[in-house]
Image (cartoon, rainbow, N blue to C red):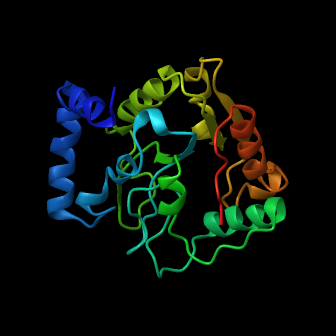
Amino acid sequence: MTFQELINIERNKEYFKKLESFLKEEYSSKTIFPPKDEVFSMFNYCELDEVKVVIIGQDPYHEINQAHGLAFSVKEGNKLPKSLINIYKELYDDLLITRLTGELSDWARQGVFLINTILTVEEGKANSHRNKGWEIFTSRVIEELNKDNHPKVFVLWGKQAFEYEKMITNSKHGIIKSAHPSPLSAYREFFGSKPFSRINEFLKNNNLEPIDWS
């Protein structure tokens, strides 16, 4: 199955029709992120059977000019959010790589699928689009990624992402878990977890090209 086929199937379901109706009203009356044409941009960089790494975020950044449809990524030229600063700190500690831009589309092009569990948010209101239907949709995406037999590693950062672990039943895949990189929890178990080297080790062990994180 392709991502587009999956989206088309879900669009015909009752929950998704309600979600689209809700979003139509929200976009017409409030400032919602990411922009409407970027909500599904995580699907544009590689196909379902090309995904090598799945990183599950929570909901999009809720300040202006940040969210653009890739979890943890910010639009070029914007200052780095605190979670991303912590991700880059761990990247440096793990692999001595320094990144200057917060835009992660170069990772996405290599098969790193950056998906939030909730795909839209109202400006300044974290989790404002929770329980509107996005969680059903993203669960379906994770289910299809799990069904696909191309080996991939699922990276679960924080409690919300941990809820998806029970869906990852295919023995071809790997799981890397730690605390969320947000300032509230990064010091608990995120720092020192070395996710980037562990991801590349999994990929090499499965005869896949490692990710160039730089």
- Would you say 13 lies left or right of 83 here? left
Compared with 95, 64 (above or below) is below
Instruction: Please identify the quarter of the rendering in which residue 172 is found.
Output: top right
- Residue 151 locus on image (x, y percent): 60, 29
Please state which of residues 95 and 26 is positioned toward the viewer in this rendering.
95
- Residue 53 locus on image (x, y percent): 58, 42
| Residue at the image position 15 percent from the left and 43 percent from the top | 21
Asked if one can make out residue 117 in the rendered structure from this viewpoint, the answer is: yes
Compared with 59, 12 (above or below) is above
Compared with 51, 65 (above or below) is below
Asked if one can make out residue 183 in the rendered structure from this viewpoint, the answer is: no
| Residue at the image position 62 percent from the left and 78 percent from the top | 100
Quadrant containing the N terminus is top left
| Residue at the image position 68 percent from the left and 34 percent from the top | 207
- Residue 114 locus on image (x, y percent): 50, 49
| Residue at the image position 62 percent from the left and 27 percent from the top | 165
- Would you say 100 lies left or right of 2 here? right
- Would you say 192 lies left or right of 80 here? right
Please state which of residues 40 and 162 is positioned toward the viewer in this rendering.
40
Instruction: Please identify the quarter of the rendering in which residue 191 is found.
Output: bottom right
